Image (tube, rainbow, N blue to C red):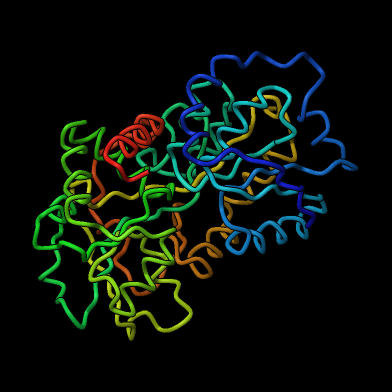
Amino acid sequence: MRSLRPGLLAAAVGSLLLLSACGDDAEPAAEGTGAAEAADDADEPLVVYSGRDEELVGPLLEQFEDASGRTVDVRYAGTTELAAQLLEEGEQTPADVFLSQDAGALGALASAGRLATLPEEVTSAVAPEYSSRDGSWVALTGRARVVAYDSQTYTEADVPGDVQALADPRWRGQVAIAPTNASFQSFVTALRVSEGEEAARAWLEGLVANEAQIHSGNGAILEAVNTGAAGLGLINHYYWAGHESDPAQLRVQLKFGDPGSVSALVNTSGVGVLAEAGGSEAALELVDFLLSEQAQTYFAEETAEYPLVDGVTGPQGVPALADLGAPDLDLSQLESLEDTVGLLTEVGLL
């Protein structure tokens, strides 16, 4: 599997602020041109922009190459960076398929008309509460937001099931967050959508007042809590469940959010086909593969994410997806990431 040179990408914050403005400029591709025609040519690679890390999805894309006989060229970068780049490139993008870390970026591309409508037999493989409502993208895995806690300092009962309580002065200096991370930004977006702008602002200002620890991502937060450098941390469940050591024996343990609340958010990774590649057999073949039992089992066993296709067993050591009590929230509404970035900037977290 070859990799494209990533080139110079805009910083995540600047990219997000471009999402709305750039999206209005997209126009339909001329008939018979664009990525779709190239992707259907067996001699041409299928070009994938991946906001998922290479170590997570690279082996799976290699499995697709082996099974299909096709060549896949992948450009790896942050989800928000790639979403902004796709909007800037418009119909001239070389990309056929976009793999996203979260629903918000896919929603932004769909709103800008940059994604093709997927066949109903594809989108129906996943329950509608975890995917797009208009067929513009399909979810691949579930990723629960959780509070990681230092079990040598706190019991599970000590840790609030409502993450908004982490703004309480009791937790001063103890909470680790990653404001530049797409998952954290998507959670803040969900809070804005479900509880309102003022509630989201108050929570973020509370974290700032509490001198929340700032980290680069979920992995760094997990390590900080596991070493006792932080008491609590906001992460995705699979960083713990997929740990190379037995997670049950780690110092860091997980608290899942109160069922039905935004604290129990289950965001999704997902995939969309670019508008110009809407007729590409190769692109749809990849989407089908990612929803296959083989790929869904890979996600459950290798990345510890929740598979979203019926009949595939979920990851070990965490509650079943059906027991999490995810809030009733249309994940496509998480597209307003640029507003979230503006809010994070205003409160001093970016």
Q: How many numbered callouts?
A: 0
* Residue at the image position 81 percent from the left and 21 percent from the top: 33
Percent position (x, y) of residue 93? Answer: 71, 29
Of residues 70 and 57, which is closer to you in this image?
A: 57
Q: Quadrant of the C terminus?
A: top left
Percent position (x, y) of residue 164? Answer: 16, 50
- The image quarter containing residue 228 is bottom left
* Residue at the image position 33 percent from the left and 82 percent from the top: 250
User: 65 above or below 8?
Assistant: below
Q: Is residue 273 left or right of residue 215?
A: right
Percent position (x, y) of residue 202? Answer: 16, 40
Q: Is residue 108 left or right of residue 83?
A: left
Of residues 166 and 127, which is closer to you in this image?
A: 166
Q: Is residue 212 left or right of residue 19?
A: left
* Residue at the image position 42 percent from the left and 48 percent from the top: 180
Q: Is residue 62 left or right of residue 329?
A: right
- The image quarter containing residue 222 is bottom left
Q: Quadrant of the N terminus?
A: bottom right
* Residue at the image position 33 percent from the left and 86 percent from the top: 249
Percent position (x, y) of residue 235? Answer: 35, 60
Q: Residue furthest right?
A: 43
Of residues 203 and 242, which is closer to you in this image?
A: 203
User: 131 above or below 151?
Assistant: above
